[in-house]
Image: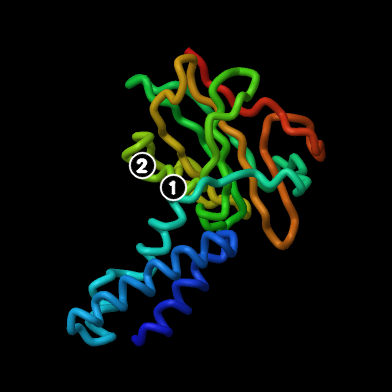
Amino acid sequence: MKKEEYLNALSEKLTDLSETDKTEYLDYYSELIDDKLDAGLTDEEAIDSLGDIEETADNILKNIPVEIDPDIIYTENHSVIDCTNRYKMDDGRYNFTIKVPSGTKLKDVLIEITGDYNGTPLFCTNLSYLDASKEYNSSVKPDYNYNGGSHSYNGSDYYELITEKMSEDGTGIRLYLTADEKHFMATDTALKSTIKGNGYWLGE
């Protein structure tokens, strides 16, 4: 792969970034490749030294704050996305069962972590970024309690989010998904509501 091909491929994987952020990262990697070429590496050697492009893009996206776009109107729809169960585990961690349409990529699910019963936001991220997160000591894994041991049931996939307490009082979540140009949320409010609820809370 040549330098230009690499940068084009990386650009395609950074579509969630603003144009300013994308340009900044592409310029950085362009200069990094140039430095390696100046050191005597071939294009292929320089590109290979950067590692897997998917991992590179993923690491970049993890470092960009995720925000809920205030201009997007999300609609509460528990048949599309939902927190179907939540409980505090014996080891003190928190378990949330999350339902999404079958085939949904976890990176396409936004999760807002809240710090109290009223739903005060702590931070927002992609659900996949909480998977095996060192920072938050959390994991996301398929929930095999459905349909005789499959985590897929009736057109939906189910996942367990297991996480440490994220505030002094406990941990709460809200969920958001954009699919087929429609915007859905699960914030523990009335079906078809466009007013964000307090979320799904687990306290002490």
Name the image colouring.
rainbow
Give me the residue at 43% from left, 42% from top: 130
Considering only vertical position in the picture, is 104 above or below 65? below
Considering only vertical position in the picture, is 59 above or below 131? below
Rendering coords of residue 158 (x, y %):
52, 45
Considering only vertical position in the picture, is 197 above or below 144? above
Number of callouts in the render? 2
For residue 83, side relative to residue 165 (left or right): right
Give me the residue at 80% from left, 38% from top: 194
Residue 166 figure quarter:
top left
Rendering coords of residue 63 (x, y %):
43, 50
For residue 38, side relative to residue 75 (left or right): left
Residue type, numbered disc 2: Ser
Residues tagged 1 and 2 counted as in contact (Cβ below 8 A): yes
Residue type, numbered disc 1: Tyr
Q: Quadrant of the N terminus?
A: bottom left
* SS for callout 1: helix
User: Cα distance, mark 1 to mark 2?
Assistant: 7 Å
Label 2 Cα crowd, 10 Å radius (few <14 / some 14-19 / many 20+):
few
In this view, which residue lies farthest toward the top? 204
Give me the residue at 44% from left, 64% from top: 25
Residue 133 figure quarter:
top left
Q: Which mark is residue 129?
A: 1
Q: Is residue 147 visible?
A: no
Q: Residue 99 carries which label?
A: none
* SS for callout 2: loop
Give me the residue at 81% from left, 36% from top: 193
**Can you identify the residue that label 2 sits on?**
133
Rendering coords of residue 135 (x, y %):
35, 37
